[in-house]
Amino acid sequence: MSADYDEFKTIMDENVDGHPVDIRYGESMTEGLPAVRILKYDDYPRPGFKTAVTYGLSLADHPESPHWTDSKPELSICVRSAHDMWGGLIGLMADVFRGDRPVEPGKRLTFNFPMNEHTHMDGIMVGGPAPFPMNPIALTTRKILIRSAYPIYRSEGTVIDSDGWERFLERIGQDALFDPWRPSLVTDTPPSSD
């Protein structure tokens, strides 16, 4: 793809202590930019978890966003799940957001339906910096800040807007942040099992 991508991938290899990676990408939905790459790590940071990190969101410019001045964003999601679809969802979010929407804590991408048959959740929210040892990542050409992304229910947007994204995450609780079948804070949506 590019020297920047190779440099990013090398640093991510260090961030995950050489854990095996599966790299995926589709077709770009953003004219003039290459496809978003998705670095997927099974059983990371521990067995039963899926972690995915994007590369490609940071290739776009978004001059209106103060969050894009010191560094450019990429996204990471970590869920307790046996299903691979989570990486594809943040890849989609990165492609939809790049150059068009600010990628700031509390911003959401939601759907009118559950994201798959293993959850009733229908959205993803951007949070703070992802907990990698080297984050932000200083590339030769730019600095990248990997932001965490969390599965949410669209109905929880009211709580995020009223309480703020940090308070929302506190209310969910540390363990439930990674649980794609946790109950909603807002509705009686039944949890699903993985």
Image: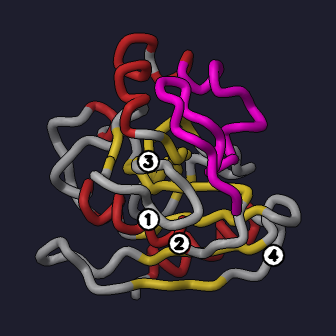
Quarter of the figure with the N terminus: bottom left
Which disc number belongs to residue 85?
A: 2
Residue assigned mark 4: 18
Q: Are marks 2 and 4 in contact (CB under 8 Å)?
A: no
Q: In the rendered structure, which segment of residues is drawn in magenta?
A: 168-194
Which disc number belongs to residue 125?
A: none
Residue furthest left as drawn: 31
Horizontal side of residue 60 vs 133, given as left or right: left
Q: Are marks 3 and 1 in contact (CB under 8 Å)?
A: yes
Mark earlier in primary sequence (2, 3) = 2
Q: Secondary structure at mark 3?
A: strand
Q: Are marks 1 and 2 in contact (CB under 8 Å)?
A: yes
Q: Are marks 2 and 3 in contact (CB under 8 Å)?
A: no
Question: What is the spatial separation of the Cα atoms under label 1 and label 2, in whole angstroms?
Answer: 6 Å
Q: Are marks 4 and 1 in contact (CB under 8 Å)?
A: no
Residue at x 28% of width, y 31% of height:
66
Question: What is the spatial separation of the Cα atoms under label 2 and label 3, in whole angstroms?
Answer: 13 Å
Q: Secondary structure at mark 4?
A: loop
Q: Secondary structure at mark 2?
A: helix
Question: What is the spatial separation of the Cα atoms under label 3 and label 1, in whole angstroms?
Answer: 8 Å
